[in-house]
Amino acid sequence: MQCNRFKECASLLVVVLLICSSTKAEQSTTNATAGNEHGAPPSGYQIVTFKWHHVMDPYIIALWVLVASIAKMLFHMSSKLTTVIPESALLIFIGLLLGGVVWGADHTASYSMTPRLFFFYLLPLIVLDAGYFMPNRQFFGNFGAILVYAVIATVWNAASVGLSLYGVYLTGVMGELKVDGMLDFLLFGSLLSAVDPVAVIAVFEEVHVDEVLYIIVFGESLLNDGVTVVLYNVFDSFIAIGGVNVTGVDCVKGVVSFFVVALGGTLIGIVFAFLLSYISRFTKRVQIIEPGFVFVISYLSYLTAEMLSLSSILAITFTGVCCQKYVQANLCKESATTVRYMMKMLANGSETIIFMMLGISAVDGGIWVWNTAFILLTLLFIAVYRVVGVVVLTWFLNRYRVVPLGFIDQVVMSYGGLRGAVAYGLVASLDEARVQERKLFFTTTIIVIYFTVVLQGCTTKSLVTWLKVKRSEHREPSISEKLNGRAFDHILSAIEDISGQIGHHYIWDKWESFDRKYLCKLLMRKSALKSSDQILDVFHDLNIKDAITYIAEGERKGSLAFIQTPNTDQLVNVNFHSSKQSEVDASMSVLKEGASAVCLDMQAVELRWKNLRESEDVYTHHLLQQYLYKPKKQLKYKYGRHDITSTEDDAQEKEIFEKTMKRRLASFKSTKYGVSQSKKVAKHFKKDPSQKKRSDEMLSNGGQLVFHDPAFSDPEHPHEYEVISNGGSNFIPNVTRQALADTYNGIDNPAFMLNEEPVARQALPPWATNNDTVVLSQRARVQMPWSPNNVRRLMPLRLSGRSTDSFLLADVPVPEEHPLSFLPERTAL
Amino acid sequence: MGAFHSRPDENDIRHLAEKTGFSVEQVEILHRRFKQLSRDEDTLQREHLYGIPDLERNPIRTQIVAAFFDKRNFDKDSPQGTVQEIGFEQFLTVMSHFRPLKLRMTEEQREQLRLEKLQFLFNMYDLDNDGKISLEEYRHVVYELLSQNPQIGNESAAIADAAMLEAARICMGQMEPDQVYEGITFQDFLKMWTGIDIETKMHVRFLKMDNTTLCK
């Protein structure tokens, strides 16, 4: 099977390659013909013309994207491949291959990435994505460390690599290079200084590495891109002035501009984040373009910073980091999802293109200049200085950090010093007129990238597993965890308050309250403000999840198993999962039972019967109205550019789902609080048991009370049954309450009680009320351990006197034989 | 109690530092803070802590303040009941639960620290000191915890219940229908916290620098 798959991959690949090479060949031939055609005026009108030139550029771009995407698809067909070799390395390889094919086809230099393409279109997307998905709390929690690594380590990398290379150059090992002096080397060092741990982060995500390590590596990679570009620009402008003309004042200016550019970019980012959050507050009416705002404004922040020659990368990073909370709260659910996916898609696409380009651009004889000493030394210096930088800085940081970074963390961080996209983009934007050794730099950079991405990328995973890097467990979100986390924050900030320290938690606490008091009010919709609490989110999510599993479980077992009867001496328990036939009959037996429960007087019975019929009619009617949905074919599909109208079909499904869910959740709640429930149960229990017996007799004697409704016997929709019975109880005005209670005492679903639940409960603090009396149900026998009814297990029951007994009795699981003894009467039908 | 008079002498400080794991400077700083809070008395009372302005907004301040006067947290000999006032040593002992862990520590020490920290947390929930967090106690804490947000105040009981159910699920697994989960015991509490490295989270940076003048 595996073999087959590989074959499949291979054949697909060949096809793709053929397409590519043929378009390439076509292009060159059409070039020639196009040239000819331009010379001579067209002879007469042409119905169809071949206008390759007209579409060439976008066409080729689209093709590249397609090829890259298909390549990616192919990698993921084999799950093993991508776990062994990182995707970036595979993409480079494919790029090389494609470049080779193109080269073999017509010996022209294939495409290389222009700096403009890189910096204006590809990089912002990647950076925005990283910023937008940055886990804020951890990011700012470790901000100091991240900043140290991002700024100092980057500067250190640039300076040490540049100066060391210059030093070696002076010894003459590298031979003659056409360089002005130190500055060229420093420029080279700076463009190589940004570490880009894409492969490392991918590995981290896969193995769920400890979150502190993760956030430090992630945060560093995000910020150091910006720092690198700033540094690069500083050296670049020094070179433009000319190495000899750089004065002390210029150096000071350079340092100052470094900070101004970085901080200015950050500031611009924050301003735009504010703007974006504020705008997203009012986009409710234009839902369809809502996601657009996020991208456009973020991109504008990038361009604005670029225009002001501030750090555009930092600007867009901070736009993403700062706006995420408010934007995610403000956008409607669909838009938020759209933004998330778009963001991921664009970033992933950009990265794919960059790495493919890295491969393709290497296949060009014109760019290669080999200088063994220079290249090898660069590789060596990069590795060594990364380790030195990390160790020294960590040692320094550990003196101040509360959670020190261990030895293993340092090894992983040092090893994660890959060079990637930014280095490539920067080296591609070198100006050959100013930097005469551009080709050598280019070659070296590409080799460095290849070397680090392929070698280190491939080995990182085994290193991480071998070193047993601390993992953080991947866990389901749980309420207790959230609650404990919340409690933690408060406890820690309180301890800081008491001990008189102005620490991390103190500041965070202050920020939180400022955020809640002013920012949220300003930047969030009112509706978003209400539901913005995470605990509530988790709670609702879990509730829905529970309800789904609950229903699924119920359906598996036969949904009528949900139905409970509270009367201990009259448990109607039917085996619903034996066969469809028995299911039908069982449901009727339940009703039958209800109808005959109280009265013996035949006239009264008849009256009741009539009443029942009436109510039956009413809710059958209601049922039809509710569930008589239009068949699919009759639906009209609408097209509108301003709105996605959910087609009625979807609406129907959604409605059905929501209804079912609502009922489940309602029963969940009322079971939990179970206040009115207990009253009701008590009422039932007080009824004369002799009456029950008589009714039992009557049941076994005569079948004339049975009514039959096809809706009830529909075995296809087991859980609609409950809907019906529930609906019935809510809108039968002409049946008295007593009658209702009598009629339905056989089917006592907690959902019935929802509307009757007294509001008074809320006047007391919820924990102080004594509503921990929870109704027990038969469901306990069929349920999963996490189903809502389990609440009752949380404490000893606190009911008084008699009713306690009834509960305890009710709680005793009924043996299967007993309920089945009720069933025989169905044979009388 | 009241081991210190207005000026603690060197020996006492060193003794305390050894006992609680703080450095001598930290003990001195905390002592100054203690004096500041207690208005130069030898003992600290609840009112003193409630008087801290920053604490006012803290929704669970009652629990936190109570923890300082809870004998379980500082008195190993008779871990029962509460006291009205605490001396500096007790204050320091409670604080020491929030010490960050050191770089060089054996696994055993880490485990010990973890247990201590969790015990402290457990005590905070277990109001009546019966070794179990009952649903009522849990609801109480959750209610206060969430009281800041008026929107979810009403649901706090439901949330507490759900959390309790989770606890029951984690600790008891599949339960028999007639089984009743009475409350979270400390063993269960440990189980709930497996995988969360509390020892790296539950800590406060005790600075060596004195900045007590900055906050009141």
Image (spheres, coloured by chain):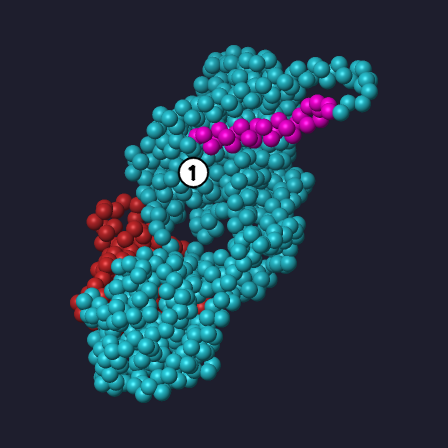
Chain colours: A cyan, B red
Q: What is the x, y in percent for residue B175?
A: 22, 62
Q: Which residue, given by chain and number where applicable, does mark 1 sit on?
A: A201
* Residue A745: x %, y % from top left: 33, 77
Which chain is mark 1 on? A
The boundaries of the magenta stretch are: A48-75
Residue A777 shows up from this direction: no
> Magenta region, mostly helix, strand or loop?
helix
Residue at 57 percent across and 36 percent down: it is: A123
Residue drawn at (30%, 81%), measured in percent from left and top? A597
Left/right of residue A699 with respect to residue A70 in the rendered view: left
Name the residue: 58% across, 62% down. Answer: A525
Q: In front here: A146 or A58? A: A58
In the rendered image, is residue A78 in sight? Answer: yes
In the image as oriented, which residue stretches furthest toward the left? B77
Residue A798 as seen in the image, left or right of residue A24: left
Residue A729 sits in quarter? bottom left
